[in-house]
Image: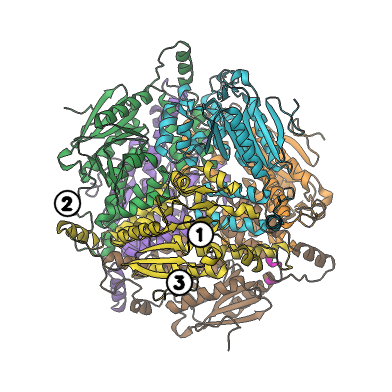
Chain colours: A purple, B brown, C orange, D yellow, E green, F cyan
Amino acid sequence: MANVKGYEAEHFIVTAPAEYVLRVEINRPKKLNAFFEPMWLELGALMNKASHDPDYRAVVITAAGDRAFTAGLDVEAAGEGGLLGTSTNLDPARKATTARRHIAEFQDSITAIEKCEKPVIVALHGLCIGLAIDLASCADVRFCTKDARFSVKEVDIGIAADIGTLTRLPKIVGSFSWVKEVTMSARWFDADEALRVGFVSRILDNKAKAVEAALEYASLLAGKSPIAVQGTKELLNHARDNTVADSLRYTAIWNASMIQCKDTEDALLAGLKKRTPTFSKL
Amino acid sequence: MANVKGYEAEHFIVTAPAEYVLRVEINRPKKLNAFFEPMWLELGALMNKASHDPDYRAVVITAAGDRAFTAGLDVEAAGEGGLLGTSTNLDPARKATTARRHIAEFQDSITAIEKCEKPVIVALHGLCIGLAIDLASCADVRFCTKDARFSVKEVDIGIAADIGTLTRLPKIVGSFSWVKEVTMSARWFDADEALRVGFVSRILDNKAKAVEAALEYASLLAGKSPIAVQGTKELLNHARDNTVADSLRYTAIWNASMIQCKDTEDALLAGLKKRTPTFSKL
Amino acid sequence: MANVKGYEAEHFIVTAPAEYVLRVEINRPKKLNAFFEPMWLELGALMNKASHDPDYRAVVITAAGDRAFTAGLDVEAAGEGGLLGTSTNLDPARKATTARRHIAEFQDSITAIEKCEKPVIVALHGLCIGLAIDLASCADVRFCTKDARFSVKEVDIGIAADIGTLTRLPKIVGSFSWVKEVTMSARWFDADEALRVGFVSRILDNKAKAVEAALEYASLLAGKSPIAVQGTKELLNHARDNTVADSLRYTAIWNASMIQCKDTEDALLAGLKKRTPTFSKL
Amino acid sequence: MANVKGYEAEHFIVTAPAEYVLRVEINRPKKLNAFFEPMWLELGALMNKASHDPDYRAVVITAAGDRAFTAGLDVEAAGEGGLLGTSTNLDPARKATTARRHIAEFQDSITAIEKCEKPVIVALHGLCIGLAIDLASCADVRFCTKDARFSVKEVDIGIAADIGTLTRLPKIVGSFSWVKEVTMSARWFDADEALRVGFVSRILDNKAKAVEAALEYASLLAGKSPIAVQGTKELLNHARDNTVADSLRYTAIWNASMIQCKDTEDALLAGLKKRTPTFSKL
Amino acid sequence: MANVKGYEAEHFIVTAPAEYVLRVEINRPKKLNAFFEPMWLELGALMNKASHDPDYRAVVITAAGDRAFTAGLDVEAAGEGGLLGTSTNLDPARKATTARRHIAEFQDSITAIEKCEKPVIVALHGLCIGLAIDLASCADVRFCTKDARFSVKEVDIGIAADIGTLTRLPKIVGSFSWVKEVTMSARWFDADEALRVGFVSRILDNKAKAVEAALEYASLLAGKSPIAVQGTKELLNHARDNTVADSLRYTAIWNASMIQCKDTEDALLAGLKKRTPTFSKL
Amino acid sequence: MANVKGYEAEHFIVTAPAEYVLRVEINRPKKLNAFFEPMWLELGALMNKASHDPDYRAVVITAAGDRAFTAGLDVEAAGEGGLLGTSTNLDPARKATTARRHIAEFQDSITAIEKCEKPVIVALHGLCIGLAIDLASCADVRFCTKDARFSVKEVDIGIAADIGTLTRLPKIVGSFSWVKEVTMSARWFDADEALRVGFVSRILDNKAKAVEAALEYASLLAGKSPIAVQGTKELLNHARDNTVADSLRYTAIWNASMIQCKDTEDALLAGLKKRTPTFSKL
């Protein structure tokens, strides 16, 4: 099946299952959707494209196959690519420079999910290991299946997670004790625990239902004013990284132009007439 | 019934139901306590007054009527006042300037709750829409009734919430996924969900009991050393917006003078003598 | 019983109950483990020592006796030491200077737990009052017993907590309403509540089991790559106090050298050969 | 002479010497323009008023008399008002609370100069002591006379300057060594030194010429697009307190609405037609 | 003349005038080197390429022709491209969104100079208007000719400068009064003034000499350890945006790997043997 | 000559040349006062001691011999100590850990100058290389001799300066172009240039006069209220690392206790009686 126009990709199936909704499916199920470099570069490019594309107002990320959302980094491929720092005869400082640039580029690809101006919902299922957490932590809303099993697995291969999990996890769940417990030990946690600590906000019975719920929620958002929804995402992300005073100041100038949209009028009018509002592209 | 002296107001009933406790009741029940500009200016002024008034050591905010804490912004009144940016023939930059000043002033009025040096407890009931969340997020402690229903409703009228909800909510509850889910979709959530994510810290059976619990808790605080209670509020708010190192530095100089109060002695002595301590005004 | 070499102390029993695991037990049970100045200076020194000691990869803090982890500050001793600011005939500015230096030194001693490069697990039991919360908030992972009872008790002696509770608690649990409720009122909360808000991440049946669980968890961490585990702690602590962008930048340069360890190879090889990996000292 | 309408004041002469230009003159020459509480409250109110007043686009602050811009705080009056903390029989913690509120209110009055959305130019002459530096540091542009003599005098009366000099001076001049040298010693510095370190940007021969130059410069600004000039002030002040990345983000949303003004068209057209552009009110 | 391999560009002449030195010359002299969109995108791409290219260790930016470094934005072209916000029939909120994205992309192109890991020296001559200041403020070192004339010209076309001047200028020179004076008024300043306030660090007699000095200085840097020089740039840029404590922490981990280079040994050995050291590629 | 009591040191001569003034002289003139590890540990300890010692109110740092303030790090000794990272057979990650700890400890020793609560004046003469700049950048006030010659020499031995120069220099002088020019090239600059950019605030004819001027200035400070002088240092250092709003908030609570000193009264009284005020110890 061909991807939707403009979203050609080798490792992702990209479809438009509902109006204004884009679905990006990780598609390497035989390898448990494990990532290697071309995959994350491709994912980053897809998210950057979606960010300014007026045809889509919400993005859902899912993964192919029954067993895993993703088993994380394809360690074998990473080893060959020199990613883990063991190759070459450079001195350690020059190796470090190469590694730093490489990590930063990898981070940028995943951060593209967070920077995408449209809301991103992720439907997690099965094994969710390592990069699965980095990736999901960048999404705005996380749903998962009953059988989802999570592990911040990096310490078990001798490294501290460096693609964003350690940076974002403490800011998206409510218990620092829990964050430290699971990240330092690489222990597994399940869907119930993920809900309890606030990592996911809904558990669905199985993958089909999780995908359905994510698409429905995405459709709900896609039907609302894109000025309002995208502004909400931007202001929440700003709040995470700034003081209350700074965010209020940013909010005031943000909305100073945004409230000059026609959407409020359209929404109120549609409300009066009991019909669905339509909003201009953004 | 006349308000307590110094707290005259048109849209709020202000009483002193217990020693050192001030109760501010939103009083526009026929309109579901919806706010228009004179109301938030009045609320800001009341909180500023209470902040330095030695006669009060805790403030409880409640709302009149059975149906709603507040239905939020009175959209009709806001439209007439040009608040939503549709009026006048200024160019968009000049409209934006007017809007920015207006939003900032509105934010200041609600932020006055947070800046009030005395602890502020809010008892939420019934419909809690839009501004209800902005306002409650500024309070220190949130209680609600079983029947409370919440919605960050702004996206449904085509705007991102700009009076503080998007700034503060991620900092007062534990799940960023949940915050984004409810704010981008404007979906309703109930008392149980509010407790589970940490938005409120207690659920009471009905409005009468919620108000009673809030007043009792306020009385409890009012009986303690105002130096200690108000210092605790200030240091917690400082912590929210600063690094650990910066807050420890601020804490050290804060307490360097505050521990020179007589309150410790009074508290210890009262403890020994099994009587209630009394503390000087602040 | 003598403490392990290098960790001599008067008020703490320091043992090495498992490979690479250090246990530090507060040992003043007759006084409910209440702290006075020499105790916190000693604790700070022990943690600083452990921080760079290659013989230990995880630290467990426990407390002697059945009744209390610690009753907090020994108020009587503090009063004698002039800690509460009532002594001497200095002017208030000079008293404040003395107090500020004193508070800062006290904070530093407790912060040493957080700054210790090794993960620190605390097993809380019985009464956990005042300083117990300051201390536990600096630890990485918190376990407690079913009978643990907690109180941020400082307001009841007329002061705002100044050794870190007010600074760290809002950053380690998920409900700011709850944090403010318990810290302003000094009310008790129990193990279930501590788990629900995320303050602790596990409840154990009794002290013996809590200590056992903490030691087992510490052993688990001690068996993993110290590069990975200690990096995880550092990056999580960095994240708490920095924006996402800043922490990603720091993470990239941190791992640029850290992935040049042999640990990844050792871990993968041990995995293939189904044996336990061993890692060089750090 | 009556002040311009809306700017009535007891201690300041407020005139409108040129189109869109407001002049605020400190008027207590017999006391070397020394400040006491009603004066700074009045000054704050005047600046707040000017901030949103569309009739003025630039403000010039000058001072009456030949001898002094201001001799700073009127210590005698401050002593009577209890400002220096020696009065009353409150305990030191309660005195500190009163003092903190008082200092904050005083700071707010002077900060109003910085927060005023219009550019503020100050023409300094003669003695410029203590508060003169606090006040001038809040202004955007500083001119002075040849005979101006400056001193951060506070240490000579036993206090660290607390109305903004120590906060802003390091951020508005280029040598921290110089800042520390003059503030810790209270030593005098003259106009040449003030220019060399960047505190002032122009020296004029005498007071008449300094006032004239300030008014001319203000007139120049007042003739330009108020959208552009006020935006420049806001973005520069934002830059001072934020990282480059944060300020670029703020700049982008600020100008996203501001470039939708008619001023660019008006300016370009006026340029083509060789005439003076006129801009709508702001 | 063909550009050096890998640096093909339409509007820039890119040469390698000395070992490890890249020269990028703005090449639109007939239009006074005024910029339009394809030019800044090209410049950004060139800088990104140079950032990781081991063949170059220093970059010099110059401009073709005698009259101008650059006259800034090509306002005519910008108007056609809708850059100034006057085109289209979108509502103001949607126009603002387009504008924000456009400004951010423009900022990114110029920020690429700052982010380039290699030191960038700019040789300014003749007219240096608007974008010239944005661009030069991103460079590390600024030289200029005696006849250089500078203006932050944006206010004269009704906008606040938004490509970085207002963000960076206060952080690279020492007088905030001067920064505000020149940016709010758009007044010209010359080479001497630029040197006095610290905007440039050297004045040369004419363009030929300025380019020569810049290339010589670049060669000097190119002959030194790239680990040391590039580390110095990175740590200085980090310092600008962070507290001293944060930058010391970042510095420690940065150098923890960087001092493991062979360069120190090579440098010391070359010193002993009185010969020029050579350093491995980076 | 014995050092003053409590300040015993092997590599520093510590004297008390005037009332309340401490002089610390670097004393390894035969090696051009080059530093090796025991020296910086000793310097850190001396500064920590002076910080709280009521017998001293100002510290002057000078260096023995005619030729150099300090030639910086004793590279030979550092190499033997493994400081430059070339020794041992640890893997690069473990070497990096050792190096990071070592750098942090070294930084702490020099930062002790900045953290010392008393003002520190440094009198620089002759060669001022590498560590000389790190050290001087931590001092509050810098004087130098006419013949002083400075170089941030680190790049010439293949490393980026990591003991504070790159962190602090951009914050204490006014031209970022100049800072980058001299630090990336390691070029020499002389006293006049140091004064022009604001690195030093005075040039004296020779070492004797520089020391005399520093001691006189220190005596001047020592004669003033220690509450005022030390508060000024603290508030200026706070300002450097914080926003204006945060520093004003910190200033208000700082002075809330500090203005309760007797020093204002003493100063005013002494002023009236034309005699020198005396202030209580601090």
Kind of residue indicated by mark 1: Ala
Residue A204 visible (yes or no):
no
Q: Are marks 3 and 2 in contact (CB under 8 Å)?
A: no
Q: Which residues are magenta?
A: B222-226
What is the three-letter code of the residue carrying label 2?
A: Glu
Q: Which mark is residue E76?
A: 2
* Percent coordinates x, y for residue F45 in the rendering: 68, 34
Subunit of mark 2?
A: E
Chain of residue at mark 3: B
Q: CA distance from mark 1 to mark 3?
A: 51 Å
Which amino acid is tagged 3? Leu
Q: Nearer the viewer, mark 3 or mark 2?
A: 2
Q: Position of residue E188 (x, y in %)?
A: 29, 47
Would residue B5 be found to the left or right of residue B92 on screen? right
Chief secondary structure of the magenta portion: loop
Q: Could you say which disc has been placed on residue B131 in the image? A: 3
Q: On the same chain: label 1 and label 3?
A: no
In magenta stretch: residue D93: no
